[in-house]
């Protein structure tokens, strides 16, 4: 029912509305009003706005930078770690031709879509159920002069309305914890051409630890999300013709980002929960790449 779906491009004000459940509406409300400095200030560093965390060794010396430049150095360093995370994800998409087409599912303010276009030169569609994120992302694409190739839409990742087999690659960067994976991967099975690649980076709870720890539950409450167990990813991929080609446990690699973030003016209060969940083994930061067979 295409009429019920909002197609916005860079003009979300023209959106007719995307059909959302009560839960999805509460998630959309969160992102429509979200203005965290840790996201906006970092995005201002180079105009690439991320909604995910960072990986790699952190330069803690920024905490001792001269006062007049300290906040700037901190923002640059956290942004560098987040950009490294995005680069790793894109690398796992493999070879994408300039004629190819990618889907950034749960695109946030659009930073990942812009980086993907920069890297592959291909068309990228970004989707979000947040009207303000879609508007923001569209403005960034226009500002960079790539609005014709990088387009943002107010759409539901469980029911995108895009044509069957129309994508060479799809990714979720920390957005799968907002949806049921059986529904999500059924849609990706449909959207990806045979041989297409799916990549996600996600926080998942560790089945070997048991049910979600207190810290994992607190992270869920903070973001209104529902972190899945690790097992569900592999079970639902297998059920939907998505065969893992690479799995990287990024847990150790993301800890420095959180240690640094916790000591800065940009901390939001969730930092110690992530650190505790990663350290006690109840939570894992994973990259999974899979082929659509
Ligand atoms: C980061 O977004 C990602 C999420 C909110 C989804 C939850 C992710 C998990 C791994 C559990 P953000 O960049 O907007 O968050 P923050 O404002 O905390 O930086
Ligand atoms: Mg952030």
Image (cartoon, grey):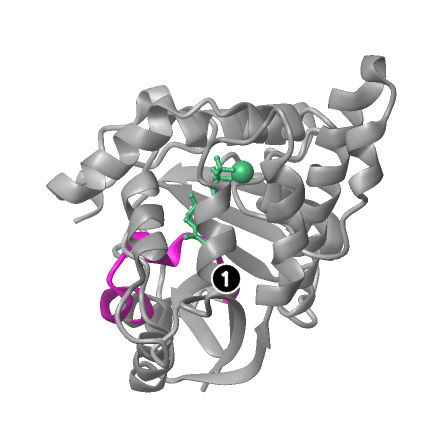
Locate residue 186 relative to residue 125 in the image: left or right.
left
> Pointer 1: residues within 10 angstroms few (<14), some, or many (20+)?
many
Label 1 secondary element: helix
Taking the view exactly as shown, the residue that stands out farthest to the left is: 22
Which of the image's four quarters has the C terminus? bottom left
Count of marks overlaid on the render: 1
- Stretch in magenta: 168-185
Residue 159's place in the image compared with 272, above or below, is below
**What residue do we see at 64% from left, 34% from top?**
263
Q: Nearer the viewer, residue 141 or 221?
A: 221
Q: Position of residue 242 (x, y in %)?
A: 42, 81
| Left or right of 51, for residue 242 | left
**Pointer 1 residue:** 278
Residue 90: in magenta span: no
Please check the rendered image and state whether residue 169 is part of the magenta-colored stretch, yes or no.
Answer: yes
Quadrant in which residue 9 is drawn: top left
Q: Camera-side residue: 73 or 30?
A: 73
């Amino acid at each position: 029912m295409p009429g019920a779906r909002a197609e916005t491009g860079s003009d979300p004000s023209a959106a007719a509305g995307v059909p959302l459940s009560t839960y999805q509406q509460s998630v959309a409300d969160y992102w429509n009003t979200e203005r965290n400095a840790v996201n906006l200030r970092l995005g201002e560093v180079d105009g690439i706005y991320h909604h995910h965390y960072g990986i790699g060794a952190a330069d803690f010396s920024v905490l001792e930078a001269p006062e007049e430049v300290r906040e700037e150095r901190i923002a640059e360093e956290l942004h560098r770690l987040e950009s490294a995370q995005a680069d790793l994800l894109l690398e796992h998409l493999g070879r994408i031709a300039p004629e190819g087409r990618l889907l950034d599912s749960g695109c946030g303010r659009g930073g990942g879509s812009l980086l993907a276009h920069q890297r592959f030169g291909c068309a990228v569609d970004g989707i979000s159920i947040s009207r303000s994120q879609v508007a923001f992302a569209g403005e960034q694409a226009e500002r960079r002069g790539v609005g014709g190739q990088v387009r943002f839409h107010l759409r539901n990742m469980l029911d995108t309305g895009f044509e069957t087999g129309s994508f060479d690659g799809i990714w979720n960067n920390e957005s799968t914890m907002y949806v049921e994976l059986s529904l999500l991967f059924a849609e990706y099975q449909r959207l990806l051409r045979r041989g297409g690649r799916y990549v996600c980076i996600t926080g998942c709870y560790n089945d070997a630890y048991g049910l979600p720890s207190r810290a994992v539950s607190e992270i869920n409450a903070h973001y209104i999300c529902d972190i899945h167990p690790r097992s569900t990813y592999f079970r639902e991929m297998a059920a939907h013709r998505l065969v893992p080609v690479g799995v990287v446990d990024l847990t150790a690699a993301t800890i420095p980002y959180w240690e640094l973030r916790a000591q800065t003016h940009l901390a939001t209060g969730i930092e110690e929960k992530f650190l505790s969940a990663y350290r006690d083994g109840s939570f894992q930061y994973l990259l999974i790449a899979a082929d659509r067979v």
